[in-house]
Image (spheres, rainbow, N blue to C red):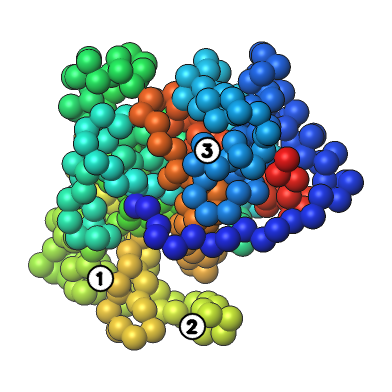
Amino acid sequence: MAVQHRAVLPQMQDPSSCASDYSDFMRDVFGYLPRADQRRWADAYLRGLLTVPGKKTIRQMAKAVSLSAGAPQALQQFISASPWGWDTAREALARKAAAQLPAHAWTFGMVLAEKRGEHTVGVHRRFVADVGRTLNCQVGIGLFLTSGSESMPVDWRLLMDEAWSDDQRRRRRARVPESVRAQPVWAHLLDLTDRLAALGLSGPAPLVVDRRCATDVGRLAAHLNLRERDFVIEIRPEQPVVSALHTRSAAGPRHAGLPVSAQQFMRDGGSRHPYLVSVERGGQAGHLTVFTALVRLPGVRPGAPGAQRVYRLLAECSPTHRRPTRFWITSLVDRRVDEALSLTRRPALTHATVQKLQDDFGLLDFEGRSFPGWHHHMTMSSAAYVYSRLPHGARRPAAV
């Protein structure tokens, strides 16, 4: 959802080295655009996102980056109507992010933009757990490369509901391709994963999914098994699990061999040997109690990928509670508990990056309604953020 208070970007100098770095970045990411005017307005739009404080409207950015009276219309045309593909730019961003963050995991961030009316592309009614009510909103899912200290956006998908799939009039007006239909969140995660994996940049980077994006965990895990992609997925306390030990004592005699919620599984003795894991919170070292057990996920069709796969269930106790408050399923059964648990901290970095994208890089400031326009803007906003996090990025280009 839109943020009311925005951080103001600091005024940056324009050292001579910055001009060269910025030009190289533009060439690497947007040099593929076929027309000179597209490359020129991509440059202007990116400069606007990097230098204009507060809300990045087309008019404000045009005023900052060009003296031409026609600049607002030209920028609007570039972002909303110009026929350029975004996949190549996002692939370039993924390469730069992978080079900057060699030891990374793949994480996901969800972006909600509350909207009025029903014509903005992808807008639909959706219950939002974080605010506890149903909103009329547009929902985007981003794929991020995330190290232990940094997270960078590299690709995006826009959620569509069934109403958008069936309404040909709205689809034509918003220029939604025929190939784009309503999909569950887990299917979008797989699409994003497959696209990034095809680039061959990250090797066996694990996938880390927190509760905001983890839906239909059994199906998602089964498809990731088929792709031989390791993962850590946060599950809800009520997620059914089955002990993988085949003993009556594994989860208490009442639940031997039967599905039971992860919370009940641990409560009934699914794990009797807690781990004490060192963590750092607020700059101070501390310890976290973690219970683990080997489980399977019920509900996967027999013979399907992962039907008999054994996972490690991690149950994390907060410092103020003796009982577990967060639960995770991971394929990393042979890793040390502290290694697997460290990955669960990566989504927090991604959510912090999403907030920065919204506050400082205009992520929610696109005011158009078209499907290509949304993807163009998300690409430009991501490019501005990635540029700012590269070694030269603290030296932002001049506005004009």
- Report whether 82 appears left or right of 299: right
Q: Earlier in the sequence, mark 1 or mark 2?
A: 1
Q: Quadrant of residue 257?
A: bottom left
Residue occupied by mark 2: 287
Residue 382 x %, y %: 56, 41
Q: Earlier in the sequence, mark 3 or mark 2?
A: 3
Write the residue at 59% across / 25% down. 70
Residue 233 x %, y %: 38, 53
Q: Residues within 10 Å of mark 1 (few under 14, many from 20)?
A: many
- The answer to whether residue 190 shows anywhere in this view is no
Q: Quadrant of residue 314?
A: bottom left
Q: Residues within 10 Å of mark 3 (few under 14, many from 20)?
A: few
Q: Quadrant of the C terminus?
A: top right
Q: Nearer the viewer, residue 363 or 294?
A: 363
Question: What kind of residue is marked 2?
Answer: His
Write the residue at 13% across / 69% down. 253
Q: Nearer the viewer, residue 8 or 162?
A: 8
Tell me how far mark 3 sits from mark 2, CA to CA: 51 Å
Camera-nearest label, 1 or 2: 2
Provide the secondary structure element on which disc 2 rests.
Answer: strand
Which numbered disc covers residue 266? 1
Tell me how far mark 1 sits from mark 3, CA to CA: 56 Å
Q: Are marks 3 and 2 in contact (CB under 8 Å)?
A: no
Residue occupied by mark 3: 59
Camera-nearest label, 3 or 2: 3
Q: Residues within 10 Å of mark 2 (few under 14, many from 20)?
A: some
Q: Quadrant of residue 29?
A: top right
